[in-house]
Image (cartoon, rainbow, N blue to C red):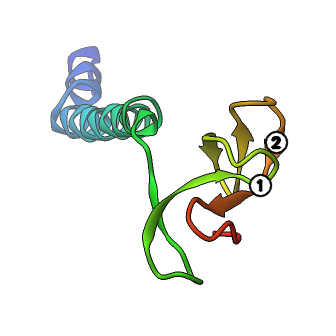
Amino acid sequence: MGAAEGWSALFGQESLACWAVGAIIAAALIALVGLLAYQRYIMGKKPTQHLCNYCGHMVSAVSDCHHAPVKERFLHGTCMECKNDCRLVCARCKRPV
């Protein structure tokens, strides 16, 4: 077994298949990061409508402290008036969303 056979095994069909799988995984990861960034930065700017369990309407959420608009995060938000953390309440009936 010579040195030429060793190089052909190193850069042969197996290596090409390995690079192809690596490229597919890298492309999938780039697409996933792009979708996550789109969701966070682009869709996060649009106001979110919530279905109120009490009045049954699709409403925007407001803060429980000043009934002001909120910057929403997961299960809570930041009141745009006092800049403190607050719970989300229905804009119509003022009950928790």
Decide: few, some or many residues near mark 2? Use Cα within 10 Å; few <14, some 14-19, many ≥20: some
Type of amino acid at the residue the image marks with label 2: Asp
In this view, the residue in front, 55 or 16, is 55
At 19% from the left edge and 32% from the top edge, which residue is drawn?
A: 16
Mark 1 and mark 2: Cα distance apart in space: 10 Å
State the residue at coordinates (24%, 39%).
24
Q: Under tag 2, what secondary structure?
A: strand
Farthest residue in the left direction? 13
- Residue at the spot of label 1: 64
Residue 36 falls left or right of residue 84: left
Q: Nearer the viewer, residue 9 or 55?
A: 55
Labelled pair 1, 2 in contact (Cβ < 8 Å): no
Q: How crowded is mark 1: few (under 14 residues within 10 Å), some or many (20 or more)?
A: many
Q: Name the residue under label 2.
A: 85
**Residue 75 in the image, given as x and y percentages of width and height:** 69, 58
Residue shown at 21% from the left, 16% from the top: 4
Q: Nearer the viewer, residue 84 or 42?
A: 84
Q: Quadrant of the N terminus?
A: top left
Q: Quadrant of residue 95?
A: bottom right
Q: What residue type is labelled 1?
A: Asp
Could you tell whether 27 is left or right of 56 in the image? Answer: left
Secondary-structure class at tag 1: loop
Name the residue furthest top.
3
Q: Is residue 69 above or below residue 74?
A: above
Q: Tell me what residue is drawn at x 62 percent, y 71 percent.
A: 93
The mark closer to the camera, 1 or 2, is 1
Residue 40: numbered disc: none
Looking at the image, is 34 positioned above or below residue 91? Answer: above
Residue 43, percent across and down?
A: 38, 39
